[in-house]
Amino acid sequence: MSEPRVVVFFVNPPNSNDLDADDVGKASDIVVSKGIQHTDWANFPHLGILSLASYVDALPGFEGCYVDGVINPLERILAVIRERACRTLAVCLSAITANYEAAIRIARAVKSIDSNISIVIGNDHFTALSREILHRHGELIDCGFVGCQFPKLLRFFGNRRDTGAPRFQVSGGVL
């Protein structure tokens, strides 16, 4: 019998321009902007996602885990998720413009590890461009949050854990 899926990762992805400094600009890249246009504003801990991880970890029946891409390389982030994949319910990604490409890369990798892990995305970049992101990457994203939708996020986790429903049933996947 398989273990219940109760682990929810909250990931602050690394700056996208820190991933492939040598390979930026190839035709297969997502490229939101050039690395030289970024400042260090994505290199600070995101207290909102850290607060979510702490809150979810305190709930009965869930294990919230915060992983910071500023101090952990992409390979380590994916290794931590891979190690607990069979128990992982969701990977939540904080997407601002500076780390959006890294977030999409993490989402792809997680789905290749275990397609039953839900990908949840939110924060400023998703809030501003949710329709465009879902049009382009809807096959990766199971649920997205525009603005602050904390109660709906908790309902999504509960529904996913209790029923196994892969996606939140809303118009366009956006809450």
Image (tube, rainbow, N blue to C red):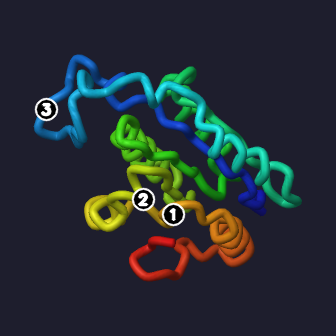
Asked if residue 63 is positioned above or below residue 101 in the image, the reply reads: below
Disc 2 versus disc 1: nearer the observer = 2
Label 2 neighbour load within 10 Å: few <14, some 14-19, many 20+: many
Residue 164 image point, x, y percent: 64, 73
Question: Which residue is denoted by mark 3 in the rendering?
Answer: 26
Question: Which residue is denoted by mark 1 in the rendering?
Answer: 145
Q: Relative to residue 56, is residue 93 drawn left or right? A: left
Q: Relative to residue 46, is residue 151 drawn left or right? A: right
- The disc, 3 or 2, on the residue closer to the chain's N-terminal end is 3
Screen quadrant of the N terminus: bottom right
Q: Relative to residue 77, is residue 95 drawn left or right? A: left
Pointer 2 and pointer 1: residues touching (CB < 8 Å)?
Answer: yes
Secondary structure beneath label 3: loop
Residue 89 image point, x, y percent: 65, 58
Q: Relative to residue 15, is residue 131 drawn left or right? A: left
Seen at 74% across and 47% down, the residue is: 64
Residue 79 image point, x, y percent: 57, 32
Residue 26 image point, x, y percent: 13, 32
Label 3 neighbour load within 10 Å: few <14, some 14-19, many 20+: few
